[in-house]
Image (cartoon, rainbow, N blue to C red):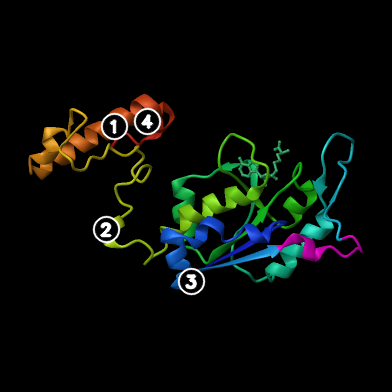
Amino acid sequence: MPFAATVLTLYPEMFPGPLAHALAGRALEKGLWTLKARNIRDAATDKHHTVDDTPAGGGVGMVLKPDVLARAIDAASAPDDPRPRLLMSPRGIPLTQQKVRQWAQGPGLLIVCGRFEGVDERVIEARNLLEVSVGDYVLSGGEVAAMCLLDAIVRLIPGVMGKMESADAESFEDGLLEHPHYTRPRQWEGHEIPPVLLSGNHAEIARWRRQKAEALTRARRPDLWKKRPPDA
Ligand code: SAH
């Protein structure tokens, strides 16, 4: 079975959006993964299809109702559905390449996109939603975050990337940021490609790239640098 993504959203027409293009789009066409976007509003039962209500305790904004969201989740995934259930949320665990790799190897994901002030806390617990954040900033909704997550996952699904696009040396795969890249022309606006890259000496080139990757990581991401195992 290919990786199956189900997205619960108030804006299903946003999908597949960018995921219909380029690498992810070609993989979708080939059936290497599947995507269903379902409208949370379809689970509303009242005449006005209400999905939100005012926050208990007062305050601004609206909160997604637990009964509606739970019905949407239950309609989208049977009790024996093995897929992890995520809620896109700025309070969530930070999305990392490690998580992306893990989920890319699994059966798929059910992803809930929040809107407004967020969702009723009780449904997060009752439906066992894992909150996942794409960064320390606030988006207006979970849809762009879900696309970000799916884009990162899809490129790691077996068969999606060819040999030409191997993920091995990429940023984060070995706990480092990637080394810089160059291509022709050899001289551009007076700047040369570093001579070592034109030397044909593969060991030298590997050493140079490694050194650059380490220097970049130390300078830009001391947090990543500190987290690396001592033998790496
Ligand atoms: N009041 C909330 C923010 C709500 S933003 C708070 O302060 O935590 C509305 C929705 O956008 C959220 O429910 C979530 O689904 C999505 N969202 C916003 N920022 C996000 C982020 N950094 N990562 C993942 N999802 C995010």
Q: Nearer the viewer, mark 3 or mark 2?
A: 2
Image spot of residue 89 (x, y percent): 65, 44
Q: Which mark is residue 225?
A: 4
How many other residues sit within 10 Å of disc 3, few (<14), some (14-19) or many (≥20)? few
Q: Are marks 1 and 4 in contact (CB under 8 Å)?
A: yes
The earlier-in-sequence mark between 1 and 2 is: 2
Task: List the residue tagged with mark 3.
Answer: 2
The earlier-in-sequence mark between 1 and 4 is: 1
The residues tagged by marks 3 and 4 sit, at their Cα atoms, a distance apart of: 35 Å
* Residue type for callout 2: Met
Q: Quadrant of residue 163?
A: bottom left
The residues tagged by marks 3 and 2 sit, at their Cα atoms, a distance apart of: 22 Å
**Which residue appears at 10% of the width and 40% of the height?**
198
* Residue type for callout 1: Glu
- In the rendered view, tell whether residue 174 sits above or below residue 125: above
Element type at mark 1:
helix
